[in-house]
Amino acid sequence: MAQVEAEETKANAEAKRHIEEGRQKADQEKQKGEKQAADAKDKAKHKSSGFWGWAASKARAAFDGVKKAVSSAIDACRRAVKAVIEGAKKLAMAAIELARKAINAAIKAIGAALLAISDVLLAAFPELKARFQGALRKAVDKATAAINRLADGLKQAVQKALDRFGAVLDQALQLLEKGINAIKAFAASVDHMPKD
């Protein structure tokens, strides 16, 4: 039983590690995308500042270019975050599956050892041996079924948690994009104000 608990603990720790690695990578990709968007905004700001004499269409074209660059950077960031989340899911699922197999193998090995012992100890009592071994086989089957249910439940919980995390990151990117677009719209309106 201690071996089973150790395997379960190990698998849970490995799954948590994979999830945390995925979160860290997603955060890195998010920051990278935010930096690209900010860099594009700064680049456009430097292009358009100091050129008050430009025609309105030129300024509008510059802001449209920035908007496209920002949207492109944020879209790239969204794709990267999604890829990282999916990778974390796959790693977590593999870790859970590995633990499930190891625990079930341990349960079956213990059951097989007990069957072998009962073959020797209960050889003189065939009816008792048959009942004991039948009960033992049922116990092994129930235990492996319980492990399989737990593993499936853990897989679902991990996937839901990662999906929620991905949704939060996507919402953060949407807010970032809206904020940058609002700043650009304000800057464009200031740029188009009549000069004294």
Image (cartoon, rainbow, N blue to C red):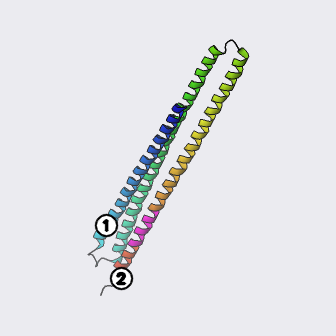
Q: Residue at x 31, y 70 (%)?
A: 45
- In terms of secondary structure, what is the magenta stretch mainly? helix
Amino acid carrying label 2: it is Met
Question: How many marks on residues?
Answer: 2
Residue 175, quarter of picture: bottom left
Q: Are marks 1 and 2 in contact (CB under 8 Å)?
A: no
Q: Residue at x 34, y 66 (%)?
A: 41
109 relative position to 122: left or right: left
144 relative position to 99: left or right: right
Residue 158 to residue 134: above or below: below
Q: Residue at x 46, y 57 (%)?
A: 169
Picture disc at residue 193: 2
The region drawn magenta spans: 173-183
Residue 112 position in % (x across, y down): 59, 22
Image quarter (top left, top right, bottom left or bottom right) of the N terminus: top right
Amino acid carrying label 1: it is Asp
Answer whether residue 111 is magenta in the image.
no
If you read the primary sequence from the N terminus, does the residue marked by circle 1 or circle 2 appear first?
1
Residue 118 position in % (x across, y down): 63, 18
Residue for badge 1? 42
Real-space Cα separation, disc 1 to disc 2, in angstroms = 21 Å
Residue 161 position in % (x across, y down): 52, 51
